[in-house]
């Protein structure tokens, strides 16, 4: 490739050769990435001819040729007869904007919704494959964060996606989270802006796509502030910024759409960083800038208990919904007119509200007491927050004991919800002692499975006594 650069550099030195007007100051004739090559010059036949002759010389010497099927000529502001002349001479097809490079549309104008169809289609195709697999809620959260949003963040590092497209991306994620499909018109159990908060602030830690898009493009703002030695930074300095200072630079109305968007990202970052702060950042972290961009909320007191890593993922999610009062209890279903009764399915005596179902119901009380006695928790701790407070401040439990208790509490909430659903769908309720045994078994198996460490002899003796049930 160095030989190609040298050959094309010589073409640039030819007095008859004219650079592309926007590449004159940087003497840019070509861009290479892997085995892809973009050649550019002024839109006139003679310069194009010189450039292609330079490339031919390289081809003849190295044996590396352009693939005619995969190559195209892109022209702008040229007379049709000259365009035809270029097409005939090069043997390449005439291409039109936007063209796709590495899967992303490249265009000098605003990217339209239609240009982004590829992104939306790709996400939908993934979901179609997954929706047949009957994934758990916890599995869907992981997939949204890792795969769907990685497709989005790949595009988000290239340009500002149109608002409509971001809304679509969000709608796909929302439908997949709540229903396991790619389309759903029903509202979710928890508002989306809450879902997008970090786990310690009460959400599921799913990214806000718009803020992520800004944070991802902030990398270019940072690169200019750092005066990074790259072709692109040299180019924007030569063409747009010139002698103006970057921080207070305002783009002209006739600047390219893409460039104006980068400048608008800079204005957003100005509210968070000074130019010196950005300049002194040795490495740009999209994650850190994103965290500054999104609104911070108060930490929830139950975050670490609900999401404690030892407990089984599906129990964490039910607990997350329970603690916010968002499970579809009869009381909630009655409110929206889906169910004509509010009576608790377990005791058939009181209304099925969240506090009743999980803590006040005779059935739940017996289950919770059984678990509390098993793990040496005072049986007066009958409410979730009271229990958490006791574990945190009063219990003097070791780290391992706390882990076991949180895992057991999550498992209790999950199993109570399961018993309630058994009553609804199968018309039978397991006895409290069956439910207690089920909780104990799942906690013992889970802690053994993840290899939770008992760091002291006390812990070992304590846990051994708990395992002989
Ligand atoms: Zn009840």
Image (cartoon, rainbow, N blue to C red):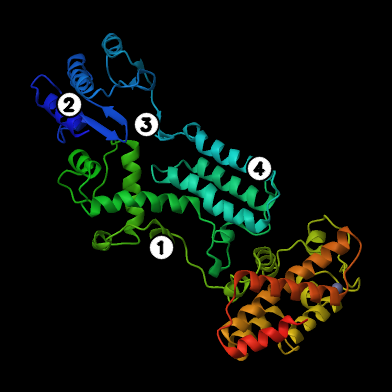
Q: Position of residue 350 (x, y in %)?
A: 87, 73
- Which one is in front, 204 or 11? 11
- Residue 183 is tagged as 4
Point out residue 156 in the picture as x, y percentages from the top left corner: 43, 45
Residue lying at 57% horizontally and 78% vertically, measured from the top left: 453
Above or below for 18 versus 45? below
Spatial CA span between label 3 and label 4: 30 Å
Q: Which residue is mark 3?
A: 107
Q: Is ligand 1 within 8 Å of the beta carbon of the residue shown at mark 3?
A: no
Quadrant location of the C terminus? bottom right
Q: Position of residue 425 (x, y in %)?
A: 87, 58
Q: Which mark is residue 292?
A: 1
Question: Mark 1 CB in 8 Å range of ligand 1?
Answer: no
Looking at the image, tell me whether mark 1 or mark 2 is earlier in sequence order.
2
Placement of 170 over or under 307, stated as above or below: above
Asked if residue 442 is positioned above or below residue 144 in the image, the reply reads: below
Horizontal side, residue 237 vs residue 153: left or right:
left
Residue 67 at least partly seen:
yes
Query: Which residue was labeled with disc 2?
Result: 19
Of residue 52 and residue 348, the one placed in the foreground of this image is: 52
Real-space CA distance between mark 4 and mark 2, rounded to the nearest whole angstrom: 49 Å
């Amino acid at each position: 490739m160095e030989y190609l650069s040298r050959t094309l550099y010589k073409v640039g030195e030819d007095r008859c050769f004219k650079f592309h007007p926007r590449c004159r100051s940087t003497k840019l004739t070509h861009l290479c990435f892997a085995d892809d090559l973009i050649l550019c010059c002024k839109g006139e036949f003679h310069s194009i001819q010189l450039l292609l002759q330079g490339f031919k010389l390289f081809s003849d010497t190295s044996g590396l040729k352009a693939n005619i099927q995969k190559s195209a000529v892109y022209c702008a502001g040229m007379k049709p007869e000259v365009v035809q002349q270029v097409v005939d001479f090069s043997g390449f097809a005439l291409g039109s904007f936007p063209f796709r490079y590495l899967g992303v549309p490249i265009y000098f104008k605003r990217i339209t919704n239609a240009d982004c169809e590829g992104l939306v289609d790709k996400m939908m195709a993934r979901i179609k494959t997954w929706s047949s697999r009957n994934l758990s809620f916890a599995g869907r959260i992981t997939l949204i964060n890792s795969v769907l949003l990685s497709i989005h963040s790949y595009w988000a590092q290239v340009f500002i996606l149109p608002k409509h497209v971001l809304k679509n991306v969000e709608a796909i994620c929302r439908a997949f989270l709540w229903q396991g499909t790619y389309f759903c018109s029903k509202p979710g159990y928890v508002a989306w802006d809450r879902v997008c908060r970090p786990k310690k602030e009460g959400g599921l830690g799913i990214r806000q796509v718009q803020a992520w898009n800004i944070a991802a493009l902030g990398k270019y703002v940072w690169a200019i502030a750092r005066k990074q030695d790259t072709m692109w930074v040299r180019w924007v300095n030569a063409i747009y910024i010139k002698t103006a200072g970057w921080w207070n630079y305002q783009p002209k109305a006739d600047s390219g759409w893409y460039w104006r968007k980068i400048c608008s990202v800079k204005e957003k970052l100005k509210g968070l960083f000074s130019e010196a702060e950005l300049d002194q950042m040795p490495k740009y972290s999209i994650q850190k800038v994103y965290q500054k961009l999104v609104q911070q909320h108060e930490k929830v007191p139950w975050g670490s208990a609900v999401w404690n890593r030892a407990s089984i993922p599906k129990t964490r999610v039910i607990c997350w919904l329970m603690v916010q009062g968002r499970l579809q209890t009869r009381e909630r279903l009655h409110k929206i007119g889906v169910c004509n009764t509010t009576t608790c399915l377990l005791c058939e005596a009181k209304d099925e509200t969240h506090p009743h179902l999980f803590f006040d119901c005779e059935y739940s009380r017996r289950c919770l007491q059984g678990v509390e006695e098993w793990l040496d928790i005072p049986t007066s701790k009958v409410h979730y927050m009271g229990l958490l407070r006791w574990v945190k401040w009063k219990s003097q439990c070791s780290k391992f004991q706390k882990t076991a208790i949180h895992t057991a509490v999550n498992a209790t909430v999950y199993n109570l919800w399961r018993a309630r659903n058994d009553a609804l769908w199968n018309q039978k309720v397991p006895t409290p002692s069956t439910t207690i045994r089920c909780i104990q078994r799942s906690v013992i198996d889970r802690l053994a499975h993840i290899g939770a460490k008992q760091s002291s002899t006390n812990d070992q003796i304590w846990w051994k006594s708990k395992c002989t049930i």
